[in-house]
Amino acid sequence: MLELEKQVNLDSLTGLYNRHYLYSLFEEVLTPDNSSKGTIMFLDLDGFKGVNDKYGHEMGDIVLKEVANRINKCLTEKDIGVRLGGDEFILLFPEMADVIEMEQKANEILHAMSNWTIFKHKLTLSASIGITIYPDDSKQIRTLLKYADTAMYKAKERGKNNFQFF
C-alpha cells in the first residue's frame, strides 16, 4: 500500500483498517454471487469508558493499540480487522461459515480481551461480540453491520463478556 493509501485507509492509532475503507474491504472479500460465505463480528469493549475516566485518554489510546494487537493475533492472513471508532471494531472472516468454528473464534477473541494490566494498573475490561453471517443474514454490508451491532447489544444485555448471534 502506498503511503497516501495507508493514511486514507488505516486507522492512525491502531493501524487497523478504518471505517471508510470497510465497504471496499467487504466487496473485495465477499462476493455478491453467493459463492462465498463469511462471518462478521462486531466487537465493543466493556469498561472502556471507565478506563478513560479513571486514567485519562492517553491510557485509553494505549488500551486501543493493545486491543488491535490482540485482535491481530486472533486473525489469519485472510481475516480483516477494522476499527470503526472509539472502542468499536469489526472483524471480517471471509471463509468462516461453520457455527462451531465461529463460536471457537469468538471465544478465542473474548479470552484475548481479558486479563489487562498496563503500567501495573489492573484494568477491568472485557468484550461483547455480535455475530452475523453473510449471505444468510443479508447481502448488504450496512444491514449486516446493523445486525451485528444488534447482536452485540444482546451480548451486553446478557451480562457482557460474551457473544451472541443475530
Image (cartoon, rainbow, N blue to C red):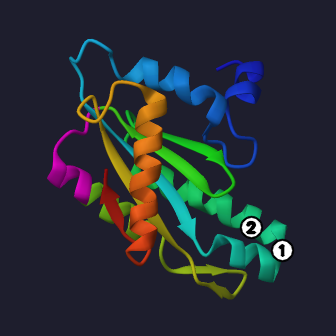
Q: Which residues are magenta?
A: 95-103
Is 72 located above or below residue 58 in the figure? above
**Image quarter (top left, top right, bottom left or bottom right) of the N terminus:** top right
Q: Which residue is mark 2?
A: 60
Pointer 1 residue: 56
Secondary structure, mark 2, is helix
Q: Check contact, mark 2 vs mark 1: CB within 8 A.
A: yes
Magenta span contains residue 101: yes
Quadrant of the rendered structure where residue 147 is?
top left
Looking at the rendered structure, the kind of residue marked 1 is Gly
User: Residue 107's x, y, as percent?
Assistant: 31, 65
Measuring from the top left, give residue 32's x and y in whole percent: 32, 15
In the drawing, does residue 129 fall left or right of residue 18? left
Would residue 6 be visible to someone looking at this image? Answer: yes
Residue 49 horizontal/vertical position (percent):
70, 72
Could one spot residue 161 in this view of the protein?
no
Q: Position of residue 94 (x, y in %)?
A: 33, 32
Report the side of 123 relative to 31 (left or right). Answer: right
User: What kind of element bears circle 1?
Assistant: loop
Label 2 – label 1 distance at C-alpha:
7 Å
Q: Which mark is residue 85?
A: none
- Judging depth in this view, the residue of 26 and 151 nearest the camera is 151
Residue drawn where x is 35% and y is 50% of the image: 131
Residue drawn at 45 percent across, 65 percent down: 128
